[in-house]
Image: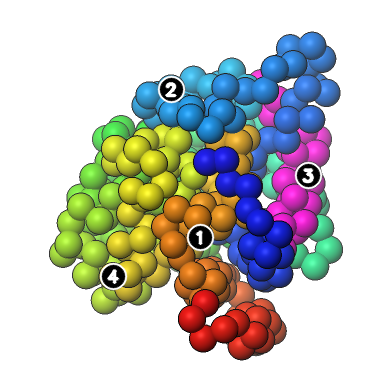
Amino acid sequence: MPYIADQETVAFVQSLPKTETHLHTDGALPMALLRQAFPGKFVEDPPMWADDFRYTSFDHFMELIGHYVAPFFDSPDRFHAAAQQVLSDCKNQGCRYVETSIHLPALQYAGLDLDEVVAAVRSAKPEGMELRFFVGMSHDAYTGRGQELIDQALLHPGIDGFDLHAEEYKPMEPWTERIWAEARANGKFTKAHAGEFMPASFVTWCLDHLKVNRIEHGVRSIEDPELVRRLVAEGVTLDVCPISNVKLAVAGVPDMPSHPIRPLFDAGVRVTVNSDDPFMFGNTLSEDYYALMQDLRFTKREIIQLVRNGWDVALMDEAAKAPHYAELDRIEATLPADD
């Protein structure tokens, strides 16, 4: 880092019809909106935007979320304004499909109405983009108004899926398996954050107990060869966020050349590339692709495969995906044989 690519690389990445399947609306808060909301308070760029910045723990990450991000999201209008710019930024980078999430406990703390926030985010979708809207919750969220919000979300027609968020190290509670099963019974897609700060065994737990086939991050799966083989055999997808993982020092990864996405990809695990929380890491989706090309020697054909992986898991019917696959095929056909 920084990932400043040459013109050819920028043009190549920009040309790809990409997906973003791991993006937190709140963690992508545009800085301009934050400064507008709190004049004079956030004049300096956040420290986590520095190339050499590393979080000391997930608690450190949550502390900075609380300082910068949480105070902003106090109304549906602010969710709309943030989502509008976040999704526009995605589209400007060549994204055609986005799965974004909000953290349900944040609504609980701010006293916001779920219906209003869902409508605010969904109405921010730019023309020409497919949007899937997820709600996430922490391991201990099913209590008090949190329980009411989760029960409401299970039946909400504007919510496409459920995700497991926040501190991985918090013990799982008996309600979680039931909620994930009910979500699927109600037509919601389910996934879970795992294998980021907790070891590979937590990925296995989520596969076995939550019955998900999409893991957000999941990079610590590399610690268990048997799990890696299972991911390949069962077609489980890891929605990986490379720059996020490096700045959070996930699994002790000190730098991008050490990131496990390369051996996971080489082993045949289906991985996608995503930006996670761009405000909290000072990154863009395009820069995550540049990082793979510069530091992990992903070829252009391999980058195209990563983009295809995103379309493979997109929550769309095959007919709707076909034009995007065809576009990727046309781009790949123009590449030299060794590229």
Spatial distance from mark 1 to mark 4, Cα to Cα?
18 Å
- Binning the other alpha carbons within 10 Å of mark 2 as few (below 14), some (14 to 19) or many (20 upward) gives few
Neighbour tally class for label 1: few under 14, some 14-19, many 20 plus, Cα within 10 Å: some
> Residue at horizontal 16%, vertical 64%?
226
Q: Distance between the residues labelled 4 and 3?
A: 37 Å
Q: Please state which of residues 87 and 211 is positioned toward the viewer in this rendering.
A: 87
Hey, what amino acid is under mark 2? His
Q: Name the residue under label 1.
A: 293
Question: What is the C-alpha distance between the residues marked 1 and 2?
Answer: 29 Å
Residue 309 counted in the magenta span: no
* Res. 196 image quadrant: top left
**Label whose residue precedes the other's in the sequence (4 or 2):** 2
Q: Please give left or right for residue 129 compared with residue 171 in the image.
A: right
Element under label 2? helix
Mark 1 / mark 2, whichever is N-terminal: 2
Of labels 1 and 4, earlier in sequence is 4
Q: Residues within 10 Å of mark 4 (few under 14, many from 20)?
A: some
> Which tag, 1 or 3, sits closer to the chain's start?
3
Magenta region: 71-98
Label 1 SS: helix
Per the picture, the main secondary structure of the magenta-coloured stretch is helix
**Vertical position of residue 22 compared to residue 35: above or below:** below
The amino acid type found where label 4 is placed reads Ala
SS at circle 3: helix
Q: Is mark 4 on a helix, strand or loop?
A: loop
- Is 129 placed above or below 36 here? below
Q: Residues within 10 Å of mark 3 (few under 14, many from 20)?
A: some
Q: Which amino acid does label 3 sit on?
A: Gln
Residue at label 3?
85
Q: Position of residue 297 (x, y in %)?
A: 44, 62
Residue beneath disc 4: 267
- Of tags 1 and 2, the one toward the viewer is 1
